[in-house]
Image (cartoon, rainbow, N blue to C red):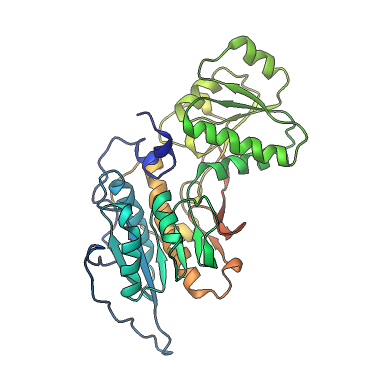
Amino acid sequence: MAASVAAAQSPGYILQQNQQTLRNIGTSAASAPLASPAVAAPATPAAKLSDNKPRLHLGLLLPVEAPQLGDAAQVVKAGFDAAAQQDSNVQLSFVALASENDAVKGYQQLLAAGANVIVGPLTREGAANVAAQASVPTLVLNTLSKAPAGGKVWSLSLAVESEARQIARMMRDDGRKAPLVLFNNDALSTRLRAAFSESWTQRHPSAPLELNMTQPDGAQLNTLLAGADSVFLALDDKEAEASRALLPAELAAYATSLINTRQAAPALDGVRFVDMPWFLMPNHPDAAGIARPATPLTKATERLYALGVDAFRLGKALGQSRNPASIRLRGVTGDLQLGKDWVIQRELPTAIRGESQ
């Protein structure tokens, strides 16, 4: 299914890579829903711990009833609840949105219920609207186009641009001097290309070579390959597979997590890529204790589940920390820390396609 620019900017883009229904997936809900944003709901008093300190009250705000984003939000919530089931010391409240236009109303409802940390919403527009109103520590689950005011908002997302930047650093560390970027006209590919090139040129005097593979020119490809010592496949799995088949087998190739699917793709064997520990390190102690989705998902969709897991953990950390800049979390979506400004940085482990992971 073709993805529009708007879709490519939201978690809904991931769901376009699936053909199964995702309703009612995951574990049973740990967070009890409040009424809809338009209806007031009484707050549940926060329980007290033995040392008389108030229990952390974490609010979750997701568009689980939205026609287009409902499936994505359900997956995120399932991961959030799976993590919450491992921790009985956090009080939870949940607001189910039918539209992210109601995000601010839902946010205010969670505040009225006593939440002192809020996680959500899921889209860029909803995140921006909530960020402008934030009065307690808030973790939005998408990117923000401008700095939020007040210092109470942080952004956690699965934006692939961060992966492209990490690949650029990895290639430099591997001693690559002349990478060739293969891309196409797809919005996601364009974003990968731009992020890689920006990161590469920050520490390298010359820009990377580039070739648009929408209508590949064999002669031009051969000319560029003559001056390249590596290639970055700024493409999805199918396009990366087709492009890799045109390249010399000995040429070092790199890609993002988009190539890490459950489908066999021999042409991609040997390609270096990054992906979250949830897949590459499933037996890691920080991932092993979390229930896996009750219904099998594609890897693309399961990444949203992992996002929910880390959303709970980061929300809890924000509520317990007096210095959020010091937060370091070995998350299931990557090693997480507060980076530049308000953005949660993710550093991903690396692997080689076709090898045991």
Tally of marks: 0
Residue most toward the right? Answer: 205
Residue 279 visible within the image = yes
Find residue 9 and report its image quarter.
Answer: top left
Considering only vertical position in the picture, is 263 above or below 107?
Answer: above
- The answer to which of 56 and 231 lies nearer the viewer is 56
- Percent across and percent down for residue 123 are 39, 50
Find residue 136 and report its image quarter.
Answer: bottom left
- The answer to which of 136 and 81 lies nearer the viewer is 136
Quadrant occupied by the N terminus: top left
- Percent across and percent down for residue 81 are 33, 62
- The answer to which of 294 and 48 lies nearer the viewer is 48
Considering only vertical position in the picture, is 218 above or below 307?
Answer: above
Residue most toward the top? Answer: 219
Residue drawn at x 51%, y 15% is: 215
- The answer to which of 356 and 94 lies nearer the viewer is 94
Considering only vertical position in the picture, is 114 above or below 157?
Answer: below
- Percent across and percent down for residue 274 are 55, 42
Say whether residue 63 is left or right of residue 212.
left
Residue drawn at x 51%, y 42% is: 160
Say whether residue 192 is left or right of residue 14.
right
Residue drawn at x 69%, y 29% is: 208
Say whether residue 277 is left or right of residue 326.
left
Residue 293 visible within the image = no
Find residue 56 and report its image quarter.
Answer: bottom left
Residue drawn at x 58%, y 39% is: 164
Say whether residue 168 is left or right of residue 114.
right
- Percent across and percent down for residue 322 are 56, 76
